[in-house]
Image (tube, rainbow, N blue to C red):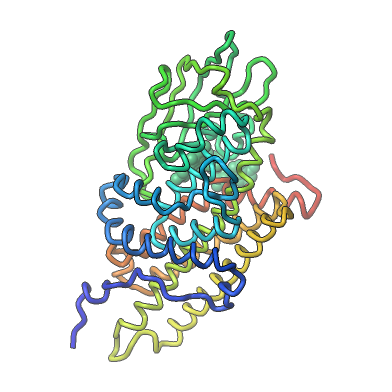
Amino acid sequence: MTTTVTALAQDIGLARETDYYLMKEQLTQDEVDLLYKVRKFAETEVLPVVNPYWERGEFPFELVPRLAELNIIGDTMAGYGTTPMSAVGSGLVAYELSRVDGSIATFFSVHVGLAMQSIYLLGSDEQKQRWLPPMARLEKVGAFALTEPEHGSDSVILEATARRDGAEWVLNGRKRWPGNAVWCDVIVVFARDMEDGQVKAFVVEKDNPGYAASKIEGKVSLRLVQNADITLDNCRVSEDARLQNCNSFADVARVLKGTRNTVAWASAGHGVAAYDIALNYAQRRTQFGRLIAKNQMIQSVLVEMLGEITAMQLYCIRLGRLIDDGKMSDTMASLAKYFCSVKARHVCRLARDVLGGNGILLDFHVMRHVCDMEALVTYEGTAEIQALIVGREITGQSAFA
Ligand SMILES: Cc1cc2nc3c(=O)[nH]c(=O)nc-3n(C[C@H](O)[C@H](O)[C@H](O)COP(=O)(O)OP(=O)(O)OC[C@H]3O[C@@H](n4cnc5c(N)ncnc54)[C@H](O)[C@@H]3O)c2cc1C
């Protein structure tokens, strides 16, 4: 009997309970409930619509109100309309969203982990009261603008300027890559104070004169996310838009430290998805008169993938608990981001091979994970930069240029 491509693709993106070392036993009941809540949403509402949006490179705005209803905006923040959750819980949200689609997960982590957390960690109480509740309800969507056309890995020497002019600030410069920024409501912009030379943060509203954002076209990773090129041309904001507790780049680093946890979890989500798809496929696809799962080489690849994703799961849960216990260092976050993103990219590529020609079809989802992992290895600090950060710590020698 012949098996059609459509039949093979049927349900191939649905999760298996891939949890070889019983990670779920390490979770609280609240965390398990959160995991299944997000999984149900992702599988029933994101998975059926994601491929056409991916192909068109458009953002599915219809999902935003549904995401708001889930009450999953928390990410270790307390109060201001956010939903309380542990760092592990926050990681599980990234894991489950990424298991289905990296773009939705990235949209979410930019809004929560970068934009909201910047305001939460760097803003005054008044500023938090003003912006966080509508963002927690997803009535306002946020973005985060640190990277510039000439400064990515070395964003510490960013060139955008901020000049104080009475009760206002005048921002000038360019930013590149911020996710959500083409259409977001508020964007946290980092610029150098011309007076003291330190990096300061400003919340800019989308209709602010002097602020312009245009979509970066031709992106083949995270295609639903709208990344922007931004121009600040004498963009005036008031002093109360300057986040009052951002006084240097070290404060920016406080925000990035938390998001590296989320990228590690998101990478694990992509890796697990790719493994699940490869295993589902190997148990359905027949060649030479027998299932491809019967081949030693296919089993060897599947076991390699399982080993890598199990390591990622263990990394992530331990990292989350270290955050919850206040014990995570910057370099621990860097090592997890480095390990999980590089390994997940490898696992996704292995999975794509297991699917043969079908591996490059959107219907089988795995190629989307392959493409999306390329962005995760790069953003929030490339694999090389994470390696340099950890290498400096373990050797006591800085290899940064
Ligand atoms: C999809 C996507 C979404 C993004 N979203 C955001 C966002 O929301 N907000 C935001 O501000 N930014 C965002 N970024 C930017 C992202 O953080 C940067 O792309 C990243 O930091 C790398 O910078 P770069 O692209 O300029 O690469 P470069 O810094 O030019 O690096 C090029 C290569 O050189 C390597 N390299 C650089 N310096 C060294 C060194 N000293 N030693 C060894 N190797 C080195 C890098 O590892 C890399 O391999 C996003 C990027 C992407 C691709």
Write down the quadrant of residue 78 in the picture: top right
Write down the quadrant of residue 9 in the picture: bottom left
182 relative position to 49: left or right: right
Provide residue 315's location: percent of width, then percent of height: 63, 65
Which residue corresponds to the image point at 46% horizontal and 21% vertical from the top-left?
232
The residue closer to the viewer here, 260 or 158, is: 260
Q: Is residue 378 shown above or below 274? A: above
Which residue corresponds to the image point at 38% horizontal and 64% vertical from the top-left?
40
387 relative position to 236: left or right: right
The image quadrant where one finds the N terminus is bottom left
Write down the quadrant of residue 356 in the picture: bottom left
The residue closer to the viewer here, 346 or 341, is: 341
* Residue 345 visible in the current orientation: no
308 relative position to 225: left or right: right
241 relative position to 213: left or right: right
Provide residue 300's location: percent of width, then percent of height: 49, 82
